[in-house]
């Protein structure tokens, strides 16, 4: 390992279907908010691959000029307004974006992505309450991997059912398969339509499998805090394979899918190489953009 | 120039003016629209602008602050009111981790035009959780601006400047100032980051914030009777800080008392003392004196509360020390208190 990405990187492997599915059902440019595990969200929002790698490598062409890094990756130009490394902190920002939408008389939906740990933060419930009270169109998307770093839900949550607790508020609630982009897309489309029609927030609960360690590029099945899933389970929770199964059912050939994989791999290599060749911010950048 | 306007009314006028000028400005916070209207400072605004732009909130300081930030980065200009600054501590995560950072972390793509009004200071037995100022806490964070007006004119002009500013601005209002009346010229603009020499003098500079400006003016009045001339500098804006006006005053007088309405330890008074020592080294005739709250939680009971807060008396004594003068007889003087409030103007 060359250690060239000098920022904590929280890999989204296993969770890709959630932002892909949600954003497939919402208009391009929809305002979104996310977490430090944001790579899939950034790319699904339309954030360019070269910008993505530039930010991760700390280079000037990154959307945050390298000052944001992996944990705060965002691209307001594409609707991804902010992500945050402090759990739960972008949830009320989505509330504000939805408030602004309603203030201007719009019926657009704002989506915020957060993990199962974020629902233990008071601000989640405060935000849900206010969105329900004011009928704000916030789509709360819970990306549930069952872990807060290494601590399982059974050691953290005192309610019988998250969705039942949420359903006590005046909002739409649904659960789906967080590994299945098509399922996520369809549930999002139905919920967003209801939200646009009736107003008010929605809550989508989407379990998925975090395939890698909390932070960093490695598997950590041997660490002891969770068992290694069976091969069948690993396949069942692999969003790329699941999407490929859908595409095959729709008549796409393995060769076509292989071609897409090769195309993506080439684009990734090219963007990463371009980022590594890009300049770092100059010293004057330390002091720019502190204030407007 | 109009007739004397109370500070509370000056704030209400400033907000009305900005809300008329810019439909993206809205005003919210617990108790903002109720019959008491935040000490009268939001009076009439609900009636004028309606519940879509003037509204109360649940008791959710954290989410409401995040809501304001999200609205601000979406093109609105929120004014969020905390009826006690102590309650804003529940919003510190959003202010310190989000509002202050978003522009920097977005490479300048986002701006956060947010005004947070918070009521500070002294009432009558307000005790430890209704009495803080916290300007040092806020000003310590890069990306936050901090303003402390001390007159109706500054309340009006600085609040307008705060609302117009494209950055998060913490606007700290001392409770005893709401009753102060003075002239307000609605055409006067005061930019953030400019201190004001409220009274010219030649012997000692008193660098004061918020209510301590009132106390400093009282001290200057009393000492004038024995021929001692205090210059009173109203800092007005903590961040950005107008170091130039402060240093120019101290270079002239050669002596400085920093009277900050806050605890002194790790506070603005230390920051100013350090800058004065460095910037006025050759001109200083004595080390800088600092005056602040007793370094204890604010007590409730009146005799202790009166010892907690510094007043004109401490400023007078500090000036006397710097000048090597004997203590002035103060037994005939009446100082400001809950019963004897300053009504202004200066």
Image (tube, coloured by chain):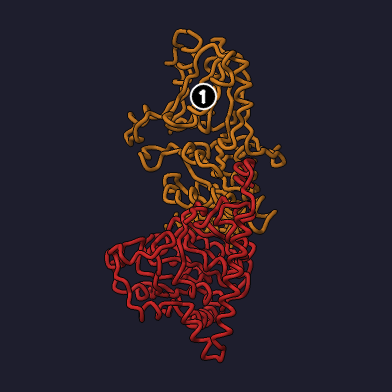
Vertically, is B84 above or below B283?
Answer: below
In the picture, measured across the screen, residue B111 lies left or right of residue A129, that is right
Considering every residue shown, the one lying at the far front of the view is A1
Is residue A61 among what the camera can see? yes
Mark 1 chain: B
Question: In the figure, A235 relative to A221: above or below?
Answer: below
**Image point (46%, 19%), residue name:** B333
Image coordinates for residue B24, horizontal then vertical, percent:
64, 58
Residue A13 sits above or below residue B273 on the image: below
Residue at (42, 59) in percent of width and height: A215
- Hue used for the chain lettered B: orange
Disc 1 designates what residue? Answer: B274
Report whether B325 appears left or right of A260.
left
Q: Judge whether residue A91 can be spotted in this image.
A: no
Pick whichever, A187 or A149, lies toward us: A149
- Locate residue B100, reporting x and y percent: 54, 48
The chain coloured red carries which letter? A
Tell me the residue at 64%/50% (across/down). Answer: A279
């Amino acid at each position: 390992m060359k250690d060239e990405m000098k920022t904590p990187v929280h890999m989204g492997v296993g969770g890709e279907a959630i932002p892909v599915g949600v954003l497939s059902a919402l208009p391009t440019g929809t305002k979104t908010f996310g977490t430090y595990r944001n790579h899939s969200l950034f790319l699904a929002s339309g954030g360019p691959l070269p910008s993505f790698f530039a930010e991760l490598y700390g280079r000037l062409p990154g959307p945050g000029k390298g000052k944001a890094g992996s944990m705060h990756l965002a691209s307001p130009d594409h609707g991804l307004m902010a992500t945050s490394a402090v759990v739960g902190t972008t949830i009320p920002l989505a509330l504000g974006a939805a408030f602004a939408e309603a203030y201007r008389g719009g019926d657009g939906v704002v989506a915020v992505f957060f993990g199962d740990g974020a629902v233990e933060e008071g601000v989640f419930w405060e935000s849900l309450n206010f969105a329900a009270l004011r009928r704000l169109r916030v789509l709360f998307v819970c990306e549930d991997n069952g872990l807060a770093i290494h601590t399982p839900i059974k050691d953290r949550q005192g309610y019988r059912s998250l969705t039942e607790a949420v359903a006590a508020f005046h909002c739409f609630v649904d659960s789906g398969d967080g590994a299945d982009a098509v399922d996520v897309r369809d549930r999002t489309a139905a919920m967003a339509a209801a939200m646009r029609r009736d107003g008010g927030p929605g809550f989508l609960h989407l379990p998925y499998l975090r395939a890698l360690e909390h932070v960093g590029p490695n598997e950590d099945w041997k660490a002891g805090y969770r068992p290694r899933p069976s091969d069948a389970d690993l396949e069942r929770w692999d969003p790329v394979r699941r999407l490929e199964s859908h595409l095959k059912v729709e008549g796409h050939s393995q060769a076509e899918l292989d071609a897409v994989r090769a195309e993506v791999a080439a684009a990734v290599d090219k963007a990463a190489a371009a980022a590594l060749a890009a300049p770092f911010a100059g010293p004057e950048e330390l002091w720019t953009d502190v204030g407007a | 120039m109009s007739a004397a306007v109370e500070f509370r009314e000056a704030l209400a006028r400033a907000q009305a003016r900005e809300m008329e000028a810019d439909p993206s400005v809205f005003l919210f916070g617990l108790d903002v629209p109720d019959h008491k209207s935040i000490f009268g400072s939001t009076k009439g605004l609900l009636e004028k602008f309606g519940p879509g732009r003037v509204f109360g909130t649940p008791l959710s300081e954290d989410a409401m602050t995040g809501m304001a930030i999200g609205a601000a980065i979406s093109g609105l200009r929120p004014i969020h009111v905390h009826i006690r600054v102590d309650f804003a501590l529940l919003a510190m995560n959003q202010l310190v981790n989000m509002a202050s950072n978003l522009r920097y972390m977005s490479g300048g793509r986002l701006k956060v035009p947010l005004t947070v009004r918070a009521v500070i200071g002294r009432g009558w037995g307000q005790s430890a959780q209704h009495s803080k100022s916290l300007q040092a806490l806020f000003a310590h964070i890069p990306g936050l601006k901090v303003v402390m007006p001390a007159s109706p004119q500054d309340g009006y002009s600085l609040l307008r400047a705060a609302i117009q500013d494209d950055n998060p601005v913490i606007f700290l209002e001392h409770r005893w100032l709401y009753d102060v009346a003075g002239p307000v010229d609605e055409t006067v603009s005061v930019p953030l980051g400019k201190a004001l020499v409220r009274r010219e003098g030649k012997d000692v500079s008193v660098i004061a914030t918020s209510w301590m400006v009132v106390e400093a003016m009282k001290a200057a009045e009393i000492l004038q009777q024995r021929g001692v001339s205090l210059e009173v500098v109203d800092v007005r804006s903590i961040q950005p800080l107008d170091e130039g006006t402060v240093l120019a005053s101290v270079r002239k007088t050669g002596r400085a008392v920093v009277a900050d309405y806050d605890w002194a330890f790790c506070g603005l008074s230390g920051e100013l003392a350090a800058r004065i020592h460095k910037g006025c080294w050759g001109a200083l005739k004595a080390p800088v004196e600092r005056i602040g709250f007793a370094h204890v939680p604010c007590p409730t009971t009146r005799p202790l509360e009166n010892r907690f807060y510094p007043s004109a008396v401490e400023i007078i004594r500090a000036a006397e020390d710097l000048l090597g003068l004997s203590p002035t007889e103060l037994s005939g003087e009446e100082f400001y208190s809950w019963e004897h409030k300053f009504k202004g103007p200066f």
